[in-house]
Amino acid sequence: MSSVYRTILKRRTIRRFKQIPISRVILKKLVNAARLAPSAANLQPLEYLVIDNPEIRANLFPYLKWANYIAPRGTPPEGKRPVAYIAVLINQKKESPAYSAYDAGAAIENLILTAWDTGIGVCWIKALDKAKISRLLRLPKSLKLDSVAALGYHAEMPKAETLTKSIKYWKDSRNKLHVPKRRLCDIIYINKIK
């Protein structure tokens, strides 16, 4: 089994982080992995803002929405919050609006898998207050905020399990996160639809 496939099988969204700083070398490695993702028409409209300053991180945190299905238990408490963020930005001077979401998805997946392979957990957050974050980060009008990757060495290990009744993830009495996933046999067709 390839190491990439093993990483994909083990990777989970992390919302509890150890308070160990991530080196700038690793943060740049994550952005480089994102940069090398496929881009529609090779327009490469994405840019990235790395945030590891404690004060900026603290000011950013309230504008992020965490784990709606298990709110407020999904929100990282003090002492378990991300130690860095990477904001995914779309340069509107370079983008094709029809494709930007695809570019961002491919880039963030590269970032997430590289992070996991480095021992870093990620929560990809699209539910956020874009206007307030854009003001906080002083983004120029030409850069549109797409999403934020919250980063840190993971302090939890969610469990994937077979989807039965509900797609909603949940926490058990020991505070372990369970994430229902559809079975392969329920989503794959070979040569024709049943």
Image (cartoon, helix red, strand yellow):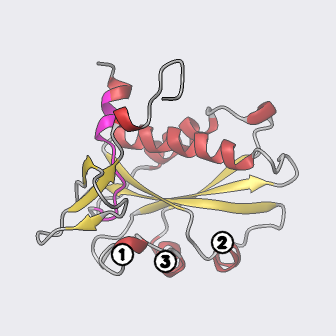
Q: Earlier in the sequence, mark 2 or mark 1?
A: 1
Crowding around mark 1 (Cα neighbors within 10 Å: few <14, some 14 to 19, many 20+) is some
Q: What amino acid is at disc 2?
A: Leu
Name the quadrant containing residue 90: bottom right
User: Looking at the picture, how far across and down is residue 95, in whole percent?
Assistant: 82, 47
- As measured in the structure, the alpha-carbon distance from the residue carrying label 3 to the one carrying label 2 is 12 Å
Sooner in the amino-acid sequence: mark 3 or mark 1: 3
Tell me the magenta residue range: 6-17
Q: Is residue 40 left or right of residue 33?
A: right
Label placed on residue 137: 2
Counting residues from the start of the chain, the first of labels 3 and 2 encountered is 3
Q: Which mark is residue 75?
A: 1
Q: Is residue 185 above or below residue 181?
A: above
Please report the residue visible at 42 percent of the width from the left and 73 percent of the height from the top: 68
The quarter of the picture where residue 148 lies is bottom right
- In magenta stretch: residue 9: yes
